[in-house]
Image (cartoon, rainbow, N blue to C red):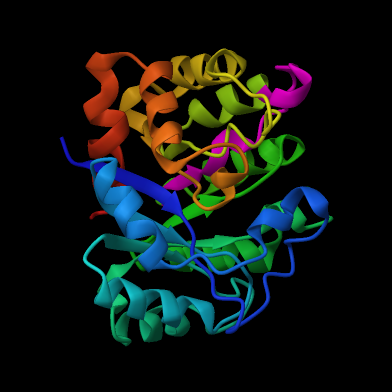
Amino acid sequence: MTVVDAHHHVWDLSVRDQDWIIGPELAPLRRDFTMKDLEPEARAAGVGRTVLVQTVTVPEETPEFLALADEHDLVAGVVGWTDLTRPDVADELARLRELPGGSHLKGIRHQVQGEPDPEWLLRPDVRRGLAAVADAGLVYDLVVLPHQLPACVRAAAALPGLTFVLDHLGKPPIASGALEPWASGLRALAALPNTVAKLSGLATEADPASWTVEDLRPYADVALEAFGPGRLMYGSDWPVSTLATTYGDILDATRRLTDPDDHTQILQTTATRVYDL
């Protein structure tokens, strides 16, 4: 089976800074991570297609990612960024799709986790932008914290024609061992049919230095019960995941957290369908 990695990043610090990489715990990420670094690890792990996801909220990054997808057959899709609040967001989405590699644009993401307003997604200007994403036939990736899940639920309910993809299961507090209120928020989001989620980024929400698969299991089990394998997809979250372990071990952990009968859906078909790869 060809695995789809539905969530990874790349960056070149000589092109632009990644201003979120601060503090000693993130110091190992303060170097370049390129497709040249990723490709041998992905191929060795049996990954044949990936989704490249935005990292910074600047308009220049998405065209660069689309060009990378045009150059590397490993990258089957791009989740980019654009300012959802700009009045001409529909025209901007159309422009991006006309660029080299523009056919690889599959979704849009914003760093909602960094917004001080927990209801940022519900602002009228943001909702208008989300509607434009839906009209363009794209999906919307949610990178949020647990306290922002209620706003995600309301946004997804208000826009049933838009597929919302929850990155990293909404960043559950694995290091603390707590399930609530994260689990209730996740279940409420999963109750809406236009939502899916990624089994990604979990090891780094635990203790990156000492995590085990069993630390992640309660959170994966809640997601499996809520979404089912047909609405869950695997993502490596490389290179952030290198803080915790290797590329191959993240994939192995996902296999161990899930039933073998569900692997085809979680490791391949959900992402292929949702992102139209």
Q: Is residue 178 magenta?
A: yes
Residue 235 in picture, x, y percent from top left? 43, 42
Residue 154 in picture, x, y percent from top left? 62, 41
Q: Is residue 85 left or right of residue 137?
A: right
Q: Residue at x 34, y 80 (%)?
A: 67
Q: Is residue 235 something that shows in the picture? A: no
Q: Which residues are magenta?
A: 162-182
Work out which residue is located at the far left of the displayed protein and give it: 1
Is residue 197 positioned above or below 138 on the image? above
In the image shown, does 9 or 88 lie closer to the viewer? 9
Is residue 189 positioned above or below 2 on the image? above
Q: Residue at x 34, y 24 (%)?
A: 229
Quadrant where the C terminus sits is: bottom left
Residue 273 in picture, x, y percent from top left? 24, 45
* Image quadrant in which you'd find residue 255: top left
Q: Is residue 137 left or right of residue 91?
A: left
Q: Is residue 236 left or right of residue 94?
A: right
In the image shown, does 243 or 112 lie closer to the viewer? 243
Residue 163 in picture, x, y percent from top left? 41, 48
Quadrant where the N terminus sits is: top left
In the image shown, does 194 or 144 lie closer to the viewer? 144
Q: Is residue 38 magenta?
A: no
In the image shown, does 72 or 95 lie closer to the viewer? 72
Is residue 18 positioned above or below 76 on the image? below
Q: Residue at x 50, y 28 (%)?
A: 190
Q: Residue at x 29, y 34 (%)?
A: 267
Q: Is residue 256 something that shows in the picture? A: yes
